[in-house]
Image: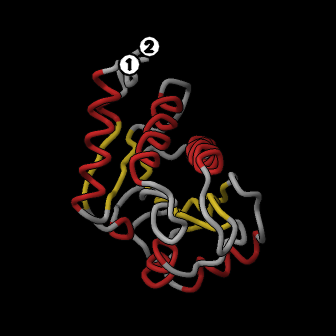
């Protein structure tokens, strides 16, 4: 299997400003765009994204759904449901929703996707565990057949970026990126 490490990119920035095929929303399973990442997507992407979410309705925790990107630079938003509204994110839900978001991107023949640190804000999931879980799912996905060429992790602050970078370096040293 080829080394996929060049296809995973970690950056500090604003997820809602990414010019990619899809950004991932850290969603609740009712697809209500409230606070945090979802609120930023609603504010910058416009009310149409929430209308599309309302048409989809609730999805299972661990699932994901795709909408247009509304007024965002990203063409789509993939809503990764890692929690119920008002509840915390679990490792199992984060793993499943990340994998599902990647599958939806591939099913839609997307080439680029950008994730935030799902579940680490309002849902209270630990940043280090988030980095391990999401990076491992990205590596696993990129080793299979997929249209995805680049997976971005867009971190809001320097501390979050440092955690993802340290975790990623350790995974590469352990050979996880190459499997």
What number is the disc on residue 1? 2
Residue 35 higher or lower than 96, as above or below: below
Q: How many marks?
A: 2
Q: Position of residue 38 (x, y in %)?
A: 52, 74
Inter-mark Cα distance, 2 to 1: 7 Å
Q: Position of residue 79 (x, y in %)?
A: 60, 62
What number is the disc on residue 92? none
- Image quarter where the N terminus lies is top left
The answer to which quarter of the image holds residue 71 is bottom left
The answer to which quarter of the image holds residue 131 is top left
> Is any part of residue 22 visible from this angle?
no
Q: Are marks 2 and 1 in contact (CB under 8 Å)?
A: yes
The kind of secondary structure element at disc 1 is: loop
Q: Between 117 and 55, which is closer to the camera in this rendering?
A: 117
| Crowdedness near tag 1: few (<14), some (14–19) or many (≥20) residues, C-alpha within 10 Å | some
> Is any part of residue 96 visible from this angle?
yes
Task: Specify how the rendered protein is coloured.
Answer: secondary structure
The residue at 33%/69% (across/down) is: 17
Q: Position of residue 155 (x, y in %)?
A: 32, 59
The residue at 69%/67% (across/down) is: 84
The residue at 76%/57% (across/down) is: 60
The residue beneath circle 1 is 178
Task: Return the disc, 2 or 1, that comes first in the chain's sequence.
Answer: 2
């Amino acid at each position: 299997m080829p080394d996929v490490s060049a296809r995973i990119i970690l950056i500090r920035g604003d997820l809602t400003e990414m010019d990619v095929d899809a950004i991932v929303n850290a969603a609740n399973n009712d697809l209500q765009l409230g606070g945090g990442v979802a609120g930023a997507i609603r504010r910058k992407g416009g009310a149409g994204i929430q209308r599309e979410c309302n048409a989809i309705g609730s999805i299972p925790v661990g699932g994901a759904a795709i909408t247009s990107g509304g007024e965002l630079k990203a063409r789509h938003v993939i809503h990764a449901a890692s929690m119920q509204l008002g509840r915390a994110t679990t490792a199992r839900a984060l793993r499943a929703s990340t994998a599902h978001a990647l599958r939806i991107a591939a099913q839609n023949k997307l080439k680029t996707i950008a994730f935030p640190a799902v579940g680490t804000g309002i849902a209270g999931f630990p940043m280090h565990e988030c980095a391990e879980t999401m990076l491992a799912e990205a590596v696993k996905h990129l080793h299979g057949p997929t249209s995805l060429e680049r997976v971005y992790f867009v971190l809001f602050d320097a501390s979050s970026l440092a955690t993802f970078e340290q975790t990623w370096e350790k995974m590469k040293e352990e050979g996880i990126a190459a499997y």
